[in-house]
Image (cartoon, coloured by chain):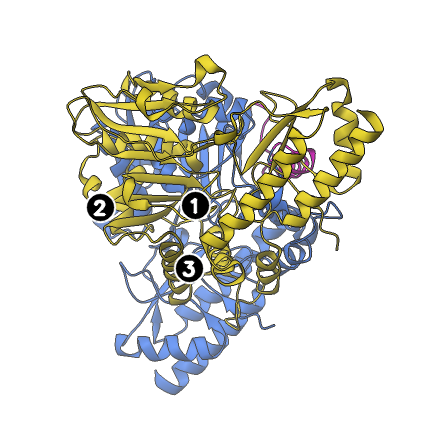
Chain colours: A yellow, B blue
Amino acid sequence: MTRHFNFCAGPAALPEPVLARARDELLDYRGHGLSVMEMSHRSPEFVAIAERAERDLRELLAVPDDYRVLFTQGGASLQFAAVPYNLLGRGGRANFLHTGIWGKKAMAEARHLFGEAPVAASSEAGGFAAVPRPADIALTEDAAYLHYTANETIGGLEFDYIPEAVRPDGTEVPLVCDLSSSILSEPLDVSRFGVIYAGAQKNIGPAGLTVVIVREDLLDRACAEMPSLLGYRALAEGASMVNTPATYGWYLAGLVFEWLKEDIGGLAAMEAINRRKADKLYAAIDASELYSNPIAPANRSRMNVPFVLADDRLDATFLAEAEAAGLLNLKGHRSVGGMRASLYNAVPEAAVDALVDFMGDFERRKG
Amino acid sequence: MTRHFNFCAGPAALPEPVLARARDELLDYRGHGLSVMEMSHRSPEFVAIAERAERDLRELLAVPDDYRVLFTQGGASLQFAAVPYNLLGRGGRANFLHTGIWGKKAMAEARHLFGEAPVAASSEAGGFAAVPRPADIALTEDAAYLHYTANETIGGLEFDYIPEAVRPDGTEVPLVCDLSSSILSEPLDVSRFGVIYAGAQKNIGPAGLTVVIVREDLLDRACAEMPSLLGYRALAEGASMVNTPATYGWYLAGLVFEWLKEDIGGLAAMEAINRRKADKLYAAIDASELYSNPIAPANRSRMNVPFVLADDRLDATFLAEAEAAGLLNLKGHRSVGGMRASLYNAVPEAAVDALVDFMGDFERRKG
């Protein structure tokens, strides 16, 4: 068995101890005589797995008691529809902070379903190189909620603060956050949010699972007409088992939560590791003549580090040599090109050290 | 490692060779240095896995070229919404054959979203003990399609024929089938259908993956306003990668398709095994004084065999002793009680032999 360093933006690297445990339990979960995949979602064994995962996630994020945690399907992209369906039932319009491709997709889906979705602030004029400053955020009088994307996976742009969601008249509205690519990378004040959602395939587990954290008082704002399975209230009341959930992904997420608690020591410890990893890579980029990253230092993503080579004719060689050196999936998103190194929780510091060494060596030889 | 016999209705038993292969490849997929779970869905390695799975499924079911195969999420239950959204864009009403709990749920969702969904025939008056006869099926003049559930997992009621979907004026409309619990259990004439859908967690793979097979000419009937991710056209044009799919489930489904082709020898061979398994169990039930099944012989499900004990005070003992004997998950659905043995593809004939022996022994001792 060989394990390479995997910088994929998602589906992304998983912690090796989690994969090893999943492998050892794959045919026989702890003496029960069957795989977790083969268990009824309503069996005592699986319900224990599911409840433990939720408990551990609540503990890691210190989720307040008046928030419900949902384990659902369809990825963050299905939440682009589910959020407005669940929050616009009493009228008003969704407001958006526009900081990149994922936020734009969320906005497009709200417009597709509800006609309008005003932009409360945008980074577009500055080429998405910095997030809007708090003073630039202006909600509409009829804002039903404010949506933002905490970390733009493709642009590598991350909020360094939690925005306020306040209408011009001073009324607070729910803050909704797509946290897909940075959830669990650091401690979070969940009480600041109305809804948090995240596709699992970066920092939680395998693709196909979606985690939603929603404040209980928001369960009563849903539209009457929407696919029943997207309704937060039904999911909350049915313990996320309105229909058969993605049981194996849920189990793996639970193993990841355990790893975060027990092997890493919680989110403050994880944050320190993530900060070190990102600092090393950005320092190497900034010290080089060959590599560059265009994002304002305060808003550089700790999870996704895009960079370009001064001479893009070197791109293919860079990628081929990196792969030969066991550094996988460094190609930038097809919409932007260049390189991108994703440094999610499961990417070890040794991977970043190896990448920095490789980049230095490559620059000396080709730069 | 111990493997028991697992009669779960779903998530259900998976073929042991499939699980063993998944285990062996879990940390390092065939020398690539990472898990399938950790691969980008757009990587050449994963695209090869995805395409091979589709090819094998097409070969197994002899899917005609003018049908698209989609690998999506949300289970059959999300298709209860997706089907009317995709087929009612030009007006008309969904018509339903009502043969049990799952068909009723599909009908309820169509009514929730579109107001009306006439029943073209129902088994309700007969206690769902037989499917409607062809002559009893009467579509409305404005039927846009006819939906039925080929096998009712809870009631244990299975169609022994493929219905015609014809309006009173003789116009044929698309036939839509929820095939979740019997897909791949026998050869199928796909050309008879407009849309087939199936949650994976019975005969395909793990929960969280949904397979949809849709005739190409039906891709143009979608409603304008629906969650984008539910649209068949976008999924078809985006090779089911409009957003990140459930990659690991897709890979496991591919392993199951390979097992069906190579280990079993295709669907005709699978059908013969499934027929033997079901015949043995129904014969044991019919020969006994203690056990009974209420379904008309021609409509008895080959996949899900519900049965009750003449004295339901014996139920708990039966289940406890069965479990102690390594016969798992025989409890009937909470809505109907009694017992249910699900005999999906991955349940070996030896499991049925062991169950029949146990039932005979139990009856001799307690009956």
Q: CA gap, disc 3 to disc 1?
A: 27 Å
| Image vertical order of residue B24 relative to residue B331, above or below | above
Q: Secondary structure at mark 1?
A: loop
Q: Chain of mark 2?
A: A
Nearer-N-terminus badge (2/3): 3
Three-letter code, disc 3: Ser
Same subunit: marks 1 and 2? no
Residue A307: % across, % down: 63, 27
Q: Is residue B65 magenta?
A: yes
Residue B101: % across, % down: 29, 48
Residue B308: % across, % down: 32, 68
Q: Secondary structure at mark 3?
A: loop
| Image vertical order of residue A117 relative to residue B286, above or below | above
Three-letter code, disc 2: Glu
Disc 2 vs disc 3: Cβ atoms closer than 8 Å? Answer: no
Region of the chain picked out in magenta, as a range: B42-66
Determine if residue B52 is in view. Answer: yes
Quadrant housing residue A78: top left
Residue depicted at 29% across the width and 28% down the height: A146
Disc 1 designates what residue? Answer: B160
Q: Residue furthest front?
A: A287
Q: Secondary structure at mark 2?
A: helix
Q: CA gap, disc 1 to disc 2?
A: 47 Å
Disc 2 designates what residue? Answer: A216
Same subunit: marks 2 and 3? yes
Q: Which label number is shown at residue A40?
A: 3
Q: Is residue B338 left or right of residue A53?
A: left
